[in-house]
Image: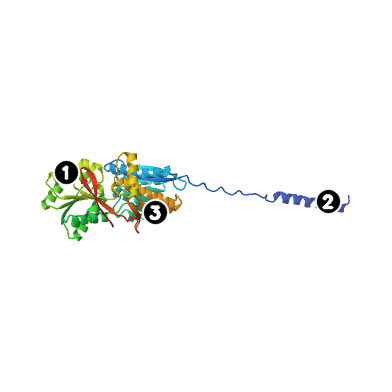
């Protein structure tokens, strides 16, 4: 082969090798599969916090029963937008530190999207900042202290607030009973009782009444003799007792034994069958403001009462009714939000406009419900409907 041909063959070979290398090194065409769509959630996690044990145990048990009853009914009907409700229940024992621990556990460990609870204002004030800081909406069924929802925009309640209860009681004393001299005896260590006492005092005075005694006691006190001696000395027509049922029953007995004949008035903290067991005949004739009566003629209320009796064997109190109502609001909010995402639930809850077992409910700018109150009278060891008072 001539030198020229050898050079041509070598050149051709180099070109061929270059082509082979180019083809071999070229990136291969690949087909990227689309990422699978995220599966829709099959459950929504909801926390329930209540004092199931401790001094306010009857409140907590009623609250747990009322909320769980509605959530169970929703699950039996197929859930919310295809999601089943999974509840996590925590006992705060009526103590602030236990309440804070319960809220943290539900949020951090159980990963709940929303919390129903808790009952006592002082415990809600311990849990609400935790829920707010972590962006988890909570709705207290029964915490009436105005400060609760002022914690932040994730905090709601299903009950009317202390100023309204104080106003209702003051109006009833002045306008219906025509009584102008009142005394107040309250638990100074409880945000609920202290707030209600102060509002009653202020409203009663504005209406022309006179507060002749404004006495307090330390939480857990079983003997109210020192305060009642002072109250008897000024002979009030009305004795306002904005306390829980256990203290109220004891105070009523000690007051009557001492010869105090004043009309007893109080708030929703009286609402327990144990009030009548503790107070006995002494509490007969007492009148208290409340959120619900099982004597309501609303069809939704009557169905709730019937379902509750069938499930638990006794008629529901206001605690059970408010927890049931709070659960209704939560489910409605999740349904309208179309999501179990906490912020979406919060946004939907703020625009609630729902028919419930106490009537139609909406929220004001500070997430307090706009609704009516009822006054109940203790007769023959039971609370009997007396009248309703609108906002």
Q: Nearer the viewer, residue 25 or 167?
A: 167
Alpha carbon of mark 2 to alpha carbon of mark 1: how far? 121 Å
Task: Examine the rendering and report whether any part of residue 211 can be seen.
Answer: no
Q: Earlier in the sequence, mark 3 or mark 2?
A: 2
Residue 376 or 147: which is nearer the viewer? 376
Q: Residue 4 in the image: x percent, y percent? A: 86, 54
Q: Position of residue 215 (x, y in %)?
A: 17, 51
Q: Earlier in the sequence, mark 3 or mark 1?
A: 1
| Residue 276 picture quarter | top left
Q: Which residue is mark 2?
A: 9
Instruction: Tell me if mark 2 has few (under 14), some (14-19) or many (20+) residues whose alpha carbon lies within 10 angstroms of its own.
Output: few
Secondary structure beneath label 3: helix
Q: Which residue is mark 3?
A: 349
Q: Which mark is residue 308?
A: none
Kindly identify which numbered label has been placed on residue 253: 1
Eye-nearest disc, 3 or 2: 3
């Amino acid at each position: 082969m001539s030198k020229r041909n050898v050079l041509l063959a070598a050149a051709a070979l180099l070109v061929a090798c270059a082509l082979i290398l180019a083809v071999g090194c070229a990136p291969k065409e690949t087909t990227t599969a689309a990422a699978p769509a995220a599966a829709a959630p099959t459950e929504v996690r909801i926390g329930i916090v209540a004092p199931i044990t401790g001094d306010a145990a009857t409140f907590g048990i009623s609250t747990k029963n009322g909320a769980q009853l509605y959530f169970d009914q929703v699950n039996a009907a197929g859930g919310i937008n295809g999601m089943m409700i999974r509840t996590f229940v925590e006992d705060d024992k009526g103590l602030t530190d236990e309440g804070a621990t319960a809220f943290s556990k539900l949020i951090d460990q159980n990963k709940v999207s929303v919390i129903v609870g808790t009952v006592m204002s002082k415990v809600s004030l311990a849990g609400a900042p935790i829920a707010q800081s972590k962006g988890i909406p909570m709705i207290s069924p029964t915490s009436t202290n105005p400060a609760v929802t002022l914690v932040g925009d994730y905090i709601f309640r299903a009950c009317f607030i202390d100023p309204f209860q104080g106003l209702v009681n003051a109006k009833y004393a002045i306008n219906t009973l025509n009584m102008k001299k009142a005394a107040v005896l309250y638990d100074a260590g409880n945000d609920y009782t202290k707030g209600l006492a102060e509002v009653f005092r202020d409203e009663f005075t504005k209406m022309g009444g006179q507060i002749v005694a404004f006495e307090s006691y330390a939480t857990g006190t079983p003997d109210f003799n020192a305060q009642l001696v002072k109250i008897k000395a000024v002979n009030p027509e009305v004795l306002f007792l904005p306390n829980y049922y256990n203290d109220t029953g004891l105070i009523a007995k000690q007051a009557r034994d001492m010869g105090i004949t004043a009309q007893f008035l109080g708030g929703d903290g009286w609402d327990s069958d144990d009030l009548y067991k503790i107070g006995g005949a002494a509490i007969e004739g007492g009148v208290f403001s409340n959120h619900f009566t099982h004597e309501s003629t609303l069809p939704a209320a009557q169905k709730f009462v019937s379902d509750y009796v069938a499930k638990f064997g006794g008629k529901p109190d206001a605690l059970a009714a408010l927890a049931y109502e709070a659960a209704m609001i939560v489910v409605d909010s999740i349904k309208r939000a179309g999501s179990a995402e906490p912020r979406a639930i919060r946004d939907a809850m703020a625009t609630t406009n729902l028919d419930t077992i106490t009537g139609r409910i909406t929220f004001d700018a500070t997430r307090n419900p706009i609704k009516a109150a009822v006054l109940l009278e203790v007769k023959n060891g039971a609370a009997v409907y007396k009248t309703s008072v609108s906002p």
